[in-house]
Each structure stands twice: as C-alpha cells, then as structure tokens.
Image (cartoon, rainbow, N blue to C red):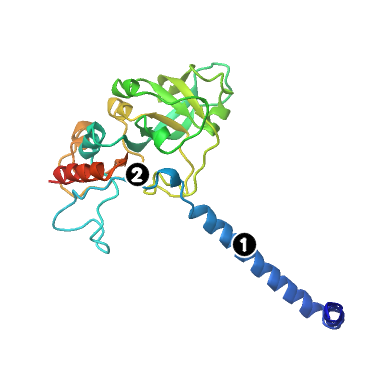
C-alpha cells in the first residue's frame, strides 16, 4: 500500500511540478516557523531560579502617591523599584537569609597597562551587594566577588564580565591588577564565565532582553562616587533635588531589591517590615 501511494505521489509531482514545489515550500516554511516559535518560547519561559523558586522574592513596596497609583491601568500593582532609603533598610535588615540591592550606573572602563591597544570606553555597570553572585548562580571563570567587608568599606574592586575581560587582559592575568574605571584605579577580583540569561530575569525593568552588564562593583561605591542612575528613575513628589544627597533622600524609586526567605515565619516578618517602611 505504501509503495502504491508513493507511485501516485511521484506521478502527481511530474504532472504538476510547480504546484508541488509551492506546497513543499509552504509546508517547510510552516514547520520552520513552528520550530522557531517553540525554541523562542522554550528560551524565555524557563525558570532560571528553579532550585530556589520558593524562597526568592523580588521586593516591592508601595510608597507611591496615595492619591494616584503609578500604573493607572493596573492600580493594584506597587512600583517595581524602591527608594534609596527603603532599599538601605532592606539591606540592613536581619530577616532575609540573602539580600541584594542593585542598580545600573555608567562608567569609563580602561586598562592600566600602558601597552594596551584597547582605548577606554563607556560601559554600563551593575552596582550590587555581595549576595548577587550567589543568589543568581552567576558562574565565575576566575576569582570571585567581594565580601561584606569590601561592601561596607566601599572598596575600589570590580568583577569583569567575559566580554570586558577579553577586550583588555586575558584572565587570570587580570586578577589583582588595577583597571581604570572612571579615572579611579580599581582592583579586579574576578572574571565571569559565559553568562547571558534570557530574559535578564534579575532586572526586567531596564530591558529584559539586554545583555548582562560588563562590570560589577560594590553598591556602596555608587554613593561614594555619586554615580547617577543609568536605569529607570520615577518620581511622584515635587521636592527640591539640588544635590546627590537630596536625590538619595527623595521619594524617587530607582533601586531594585531581591531577598531570600527560607521559612513562612521570615516571609511574615519581612512583610511587617515592608508595611512599616511604607508607613
């Protein structure tokens, strides 16, 4: 029976070659589009934190204008970012097992090696706290991130992404060497292995399909160097902002926060803290 239908198909192909070619092309195009769609869906629908999905939380606090929601179409949603003061309170809290506050900043990255042929160039940096690398399972090729002491002292240290490292010195040569970042010498502590999460789940507010930042540095360095935000900044309250310190004290939301809470009791305790901070 199979051979019979195969002969019929071949005869039909010889009788209408153009129509048959069009039909084969249409079927092939449909299969190609279907497979492409399934692959894209598989990439963007994966759970990058599957092992800690039930203990990892993106922090939201509704300290916005009480008379008008930030999102008029979805008034029940709180802002996706925090004020600087609220983020600091989250970081200083003893409730979470791990806690991350972070934001984006713009810097000039260059090599301190006078023989380097690569000219300094502008980069986007992720200013974040030490738990960032462990919480999001960031892979290291060489070295490691900074510790709590380096964070509290705002030490001039950085971690380079794979691409930034390749533009300058081949690791592990770069480790421990100074790198010029915004004209201030910093020490390279580590170099990331290839890491390009899609979507960029740890920051969906500033381009969910963007590549990870090329440089990572202590969050506390931002206040020390008065680094303005290179990501989303939203403000609702008219207030004077004539200095960087006044901006830090403002009601503007521009800092992201994540925490790990490994028990229902800690979840409840953290919700109490969030309600207290929101007034």
Q: Earlier in the sequence, mark 1 or mark 2?
A: 1
Q: Picture coordinates of residue 165 (x, y %)?
A: 54, 28
**What is the quadrant of the N terminus in the image?**
bottom right
Residue shown at 32% from the left, 45% from the top: 57
Q: Quadrant location of residue 38?
A: bottom right
Which numbered dot is residue 55? Answer: 2
Q: Is residue 160 left or right of residue 132?
A: right
Decide if residue 123 is in sight here: yes
Vertical placement of residue 207 versus 227, above or below:
below
Q: Is residue 266 left or right of residue 49?
A: left
Decide if residue 252 is in sight here: no
Residue shown at 36% from the left, 40% from the top: 230
Q: Picture coordinates of residue 167 (x, y %)?
A: 56, 29
Vertical placement of residue 140 versus 83, above or below:
above
Which numbered dot is residue 35? Answer: 1
Is label 1 or label 2 in front?
Answer: 2
């Amino acid at each position: 029976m199979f051979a019979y239908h195969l002969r019929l198909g071949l005869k039909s192909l010889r009788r209408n070659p153009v129509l048959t070619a069009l039909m084969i092309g249409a079927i092939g195009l449909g299969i190609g589009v279907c497979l492409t769609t399934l692959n894209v869906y598989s990439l963007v629908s994966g759970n990058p934190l599957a092992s800690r999905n039930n203990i990892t939380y993106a922090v939201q606090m509704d300290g916005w204008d009480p008379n008008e929601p930030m999102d008029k179409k979805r008034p029940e949603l709180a802002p996706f970012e925090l004020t600087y003061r609220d983020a600091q309170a989250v970081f200083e809290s003893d409730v979470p097992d791990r806690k991350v506050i972070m934001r984006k900043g713009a810097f000039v990255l260059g090599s301190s090696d006078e023989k380097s042929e690569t000219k300094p160039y502008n980069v986007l940096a992720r200013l974040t706290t030490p738990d960032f690398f462990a919480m999001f399972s960031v892979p290291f090729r060489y070295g490691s991130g900074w510790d709590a002491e380096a964070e509290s002292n705002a030490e001039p240290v950085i971690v380079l992404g794979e691409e930034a490292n390749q533009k300058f010195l081949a690791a592990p040569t770069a480790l421990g060497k100074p790198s010029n970042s915004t004209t201030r010498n910093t020490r390279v502590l580590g170099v990331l292995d290839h890491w390009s999460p899609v979507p960029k789940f740890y920051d969906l507010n500033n381009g969910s399909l963007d590549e990870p930042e090329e440089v990572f540095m202590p969050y506390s360095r931002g206040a020390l160097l008065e680094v303005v935000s290179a990501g989303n900044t939203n403000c609702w309250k008219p207030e004077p902002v004539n200095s960087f310190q006044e901006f830090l004290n403002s009601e503007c939301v521009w800092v992201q926060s994540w925490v790990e809470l490994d028990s229902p009791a800690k979840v409840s305790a953290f919700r109490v803290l969030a309600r207290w901070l929101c007034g």
